[in-house]
């Protein structure tokens, strides 16, 4: 008895678990589902419904049909709700756009939709029912012709002139604006541009865009064709009228719309005139149609060319001579700065400083007399000059500031000091050569 009760409890729990698992329902239908013609756009609407909610967008499979073009859903969905068997279902509606290109029967296979559903233990999947439909060729069109099918059509033209009035070489542009409701932009036909004698035709790339309702749903398409005609001769021209037949899906009838012809005239372009005559000016100058160079200018030109060639090949010699000159100049400058005369010219300015200095005097003394001390130099001087120099040195190093009178005395004695040093230096200098007539 206990085993039966346990089995019944397990069955009840299993049934309760399955009963609480949410369900996924998918349905498919064609809009419209009848009177479908070749070239029309059919909407395959897929409704995905659940009892709870969708946690992510469903995965829609790829759909391909032989003899028809299929545009899959762009990911935008329309929220829907539906009551069924006393329950309220929630979900989203997606669409495939199908355009048959040939007459015949078409079969849409079952599409398996997988979705993530709230309160479900795993992703759920469900399949639609297969759908078949047939497309007929509308009357008034050839068997191999893909007609333009729309519920409403607007076709207009605009003309643009590059200049007014037109002349040879100018251009005229014919813009054709085609707008169709309930027809995709890729299904709008190409309008052939007729050739016109005397005009050269250039076709530009068309502008093709889809029309939408603001919620992502395509409601139609539009196409802009531009035909540029360039005038090659003068005369009267006419762009021929254009016709376009289409099938009105709202009235199930054949219609035709047209574009009016364009008449215009082009004049010959006047020949280009220069403000003066070159031939006449040359004849007046006695030069006819030839230009002669005088001997002076020719010699000047040849001299410039020769000078350029010589300068080009003489560059190494010029650079080498420049380096030699710079080195010689630096050597002479160095010899001058190492001479006794350079040191002597610094003696006066240093003694006239607020704090008189003897650095330049010592340097001149060493270079001129080869004496390394002031005492040795004073031994070569006359007693009066040696006394004045000694008195300045004693006062300079005995006080913080030298006596101005002692500085003036030394400045006055500088010429005598220099002459005395020169005489002593010349007297002590020994010739490097031996006497010519030794005794």
Image: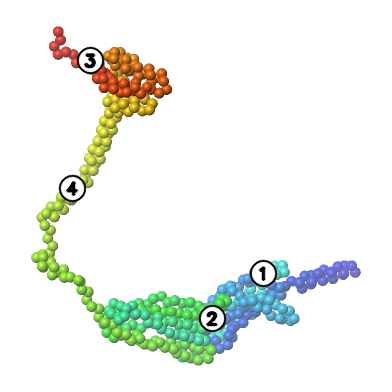
Residue 384 position (above or below residue 357):
above
Label 2 vs label 3: CA separation?
Answer: 124 Å
Q: Earlier in the sequence, mark 4 or mark 1?
A: 1
Q: Earlier in the sequence, mark 1 or mark 2?
A: 1
Q: Residues within 10 Å of mark 4 (few under 14, many from 20)?
A: few
Horizontally, is 417 left or right of 32 in the view? Answer: left
Between circles 2 and 4, the one closer to the viewer is 4
Which dot marks residue 427?
3
Label 4 vs label 1: CA separation?
Answer: 89 Å
Between circles 2 and 3, the one closer to the viewer is 3
Query: Residue 180: percent from the left, percent from the top?
Result: 49, 83
Q: Residues within 10 Å of mark 3 (few under 14, many from 20)?
A: few
Labels 2 & 3 near each other (Cβ < 8 A): no
Between circles 4 and 3, the one closer to the viewer is 3
Residue 393 placement: quadrant? top left
Residue drawn 27% across the image and 84% down it: 235
Frontmost residue, 209 versus 84: 209
Which dot marks residue 55?
1
Colour theme: rainbow
Residue drawn 52% across the image and 91% down it: 252
């Amino acid at each position: 008895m206990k085993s039966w009760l346990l089995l019944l409890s397990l069955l009840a729990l299993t049934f309760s678990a399955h009963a609480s698992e949410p369900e996924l329902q998918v349905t498919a239908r064609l809009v419209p589902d009848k009177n479908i013609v070749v070239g029309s756009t059919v909407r395959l609407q897929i409704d995905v419904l659940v009892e709870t909610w969708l946690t992510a967008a469903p995965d829609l499979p790829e759909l391909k049909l032989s003899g028809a073009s299929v545009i899959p859903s762009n990911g935008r969905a329309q929220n829907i709700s539906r009551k069924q068997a006393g329950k309220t279902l929630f979900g989203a509606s997606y669409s495939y756009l199908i355009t048959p290109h040939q007459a015949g029967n078409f079969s849409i296979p079952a599409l398996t939709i997988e979705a993530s559903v709230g309160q479900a233990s795993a992703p759920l999947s469900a399949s639609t029912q297969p759908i078949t439909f047939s497309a007929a060729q509308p009357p008034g069109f050839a068997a191999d012709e893909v007609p333009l099918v729309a519920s409403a059509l607007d076709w207009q033209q605009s003309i643009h002139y590059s200049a007014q009035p037109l002349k040879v070489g100018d251009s005229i542009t014919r813009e054709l604006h085609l707008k169709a409701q309930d027809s995709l932009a890729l299904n709008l036909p190409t309008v052939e541009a007729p050739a016109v004698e005397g005009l050269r035709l250039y076709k530009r790339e068309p502008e093709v865009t889809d029309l939408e309702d603001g919620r992502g749903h395509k409601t139609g398409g539009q196409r802009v064709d531009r035909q540029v005609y360039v005038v090659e001769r003068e005369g009267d021209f006419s762009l021929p009228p254009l016709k376009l037949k289409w099938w009105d899906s709202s009235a199930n009838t054949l219609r035709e719309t047209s574009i009016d012809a364009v008449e215009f005239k082009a004049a010959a372009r006047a020949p280009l005139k220069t403000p003066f005559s070159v031939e006449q000016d040359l004849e007046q100058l006695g030069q006819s149609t030839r230009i002669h160079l005088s001997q002076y200018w020719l010699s000047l030109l040849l001299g410039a060319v020769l000078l350029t060639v010589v300068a080009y090949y003489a560059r190494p010699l010029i650079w080498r001579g420049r380096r030699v000159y710079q080195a010689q100049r630096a050597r002479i400058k160095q010899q001058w700065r190492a001479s006794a005369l350079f040191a002597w010219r610094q003696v006066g300015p240093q003694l006239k400083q607020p704090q008189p200095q003897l650095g330049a005097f010592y340097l001149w003394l060493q270079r001129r007399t080869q004496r390394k001390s002031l005492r040795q130099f004073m031994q070569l001087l006359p007693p009066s000059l040696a006394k004045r120099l000694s008195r300045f040195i004693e006062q300079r190093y005995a006080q913080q500031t030298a006596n101005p009178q002692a500085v003036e005395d030394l400045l006055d004695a500088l010429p005598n000091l220099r002459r005395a040093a020169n005489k002593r230096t010349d007297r002590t200098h020994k010739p490097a050569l031996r006497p010519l007539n030794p005794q």
